[in-house]
C-alpha cells in the first residue's frame, strides 16, 4: 500500500512538471508582407500586415510597406552569422510620423526575449525613433543603419503579465534624425531561457526523499 502511495505521488509530480518540459510557443513576423514565410531552419514568420490573428498582429493602424531593393555583402553576411535568412530584410512595415508602428503578440504571461530586425532602404543613418516594449523604452533615440545595411537588436527578459506583449515604434525628434518614420523588417518573440532547476532534477530529488522516508 505504501509503495502504491509513493508511485502515485511520483506520477502526480511528473504531471506537474510536464508543462515545463514542453516547448513554449514562439512568435515571428516579417515586415511588409501578408503571406507567411518558412525560413531555412523551418521557422514560420507570419506576414506582418495582418491584424487580430490567433497569434496577434498590428493594432490601431495598419503599417505602410516598402521594399528594400538591395543589401550589401556585409549585411547579407551579418544576417547569416546571426542565424537569419536574408529574405527577412528585403521589406519593411513602417509608419509615417507622427503615426507609430504598434504591434501585439498574444504570448500569454511569462518572460520573453524580443529581437528587432531591420534593413534600411531610404534614410542612411538618418531615421530616428524609440523602441517601446510593454510600455518600456528599451531603445531610446535609436537610429537605423546606413542604406542597404541591416541591424539586429535583442532585448532579453521582457516580462508579460497581461497576456499580450505590446511593441511600439515611435519617431522621436530628439534623435536629431531627419526621418522619423519608424519601421521594422522582422520581429521575433521567444520564451526567455529559464534559470529554474531542471524539472527532471526536481523529480529525482523528490523520489530520493521519498525513498529515504520509507527506510
Image (spheres, rainbow, N blue to C red):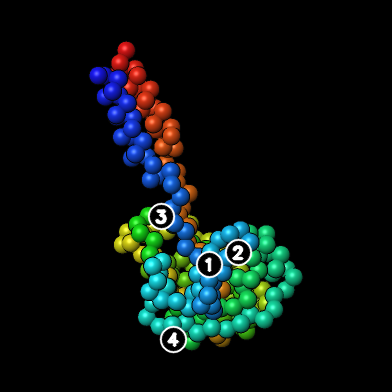
Q: Earlier in the sequence, mark 1 or mark 4?
A: 1
Please indicate whether residue 204 sits to the left or right of residue 187 in the image: left
Q: Nearer the viewer, mark 3 or mark 4?
A: 3
Q: Which residue is mark 4?
A: 98
Q: Nearer the viewer, mark 3 or mark 2?
A: 2
Residue appearing at x 25%, y 19% in the figure: 1
Residue 102 placement (x, y as % from top left): 42, 76
Quadrant of residue 110 within the rendered picture: bottom left
Residue 96 placement (x, y as % from top left): 48, 87
Furthest-right residue in view?
73
Confirm or deny contact between disc 2 and disc 1 (CB under 8 A).
yes
Residue 176 placement (x, y as % from top left): 54, 81
Please indicate whether residue 52 sits to the left or right of residue 184 in the image: left
Furthest-top residue in view?
215
Q: CA distance from mark 4 to mark 2?
A: 33 Å
Confirm or deny contact between disc 1 and disc 3 (CB under 8 A).
no
Q: Secondary structure at mark 3?
A: strand
Q: Earlier in the sequence, mark 1 or mark 3?
A: 1
Residue 186 placement (x, y as % from top left): 54, 70
Q: Earlier in the sequence, mark 3 or mark 4?
A: 4
Q: CA distance from mark 2 to mark 1?
A: 8 Å
Q: Nearer the viewer, mark 4 or mark 2?
A: 2
Task: Mark 1: give few (<14), some (14-19) or many (20+) Cα within 10 Å.
Answer: many
Q: Earlier in the sequence, mark 2 or mark 1?
A: 2
Say the numbered circle drawn on residue 9.
none
Say the numbered circle drawn on residue 111.
3
Q: Which residue is mark 1?
A: 45
Is 157 placed above or below 195 here?
below
Residue 43 seen by the camera = yes
Say the numbered circle drawn on residue 39.
2
Amino acid at each position: 500500500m505504501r509503495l502504491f502511495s509513493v508511485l502515485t505521488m511520483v506520477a502526480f509530480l511528473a504531471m506537474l512538471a510536464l508543462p515545463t518540459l514542453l516547448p513554449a510557443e514562439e512568435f515571428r513576423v516579417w515586415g511588409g508582407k501578408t503571406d507567411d514565410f518558412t525560413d531555412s531552419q523551418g521557422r514560420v514568420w507570419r506576414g506582418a500586415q495582418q491584424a487580430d490573428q490567433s497569434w496577434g498582429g498590428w493594432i490601431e493602424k495598419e503599417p505602410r510597406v516598402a521594399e528594400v531593393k538591395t543589401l550589401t555583402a556585409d549585411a547579407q553576411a551579418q544576417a547569416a552569422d546571426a542565424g537569419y535568412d536574408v529574405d527577412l530584410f528585403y521589406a519593411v512595415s513602417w509608419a509615417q510620423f507622427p503615426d507609430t508602428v504598434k504591434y501585439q503578440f498574444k504570448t500569454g504571461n511569462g518572460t520573453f526575449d524580443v529581437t528587432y530586425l531591420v534593413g534600411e532602404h531610404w534614410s542612411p543613418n538618418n531615421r530616428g525613433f524609440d523602441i517601446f516594449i510593454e510600455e518600456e523604452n528599451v531603445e531610446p533615440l535609436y537610429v537605423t543603419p546606413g542604406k542597404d545595411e541591416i541591424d539586429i537588436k535583442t532585448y532579453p527578459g521582457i516580462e508579460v503579465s497581461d497576456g499580450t506583449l505590446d511593441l511600439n515604434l515611435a519617431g522621436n525628434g530628439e534623435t536629431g534624425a531627419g526621418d522619423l518614420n519608424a519601421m521594422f523588417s522582422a520581429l521575433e518573440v521567444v520564451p526567455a531561457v529559464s534559470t529554474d532547476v531542471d524539472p527532471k532534477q526536481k523529480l529525482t530529488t523528490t523520489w530520493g526523499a521519498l525513498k529515504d522516508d520509507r527506510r
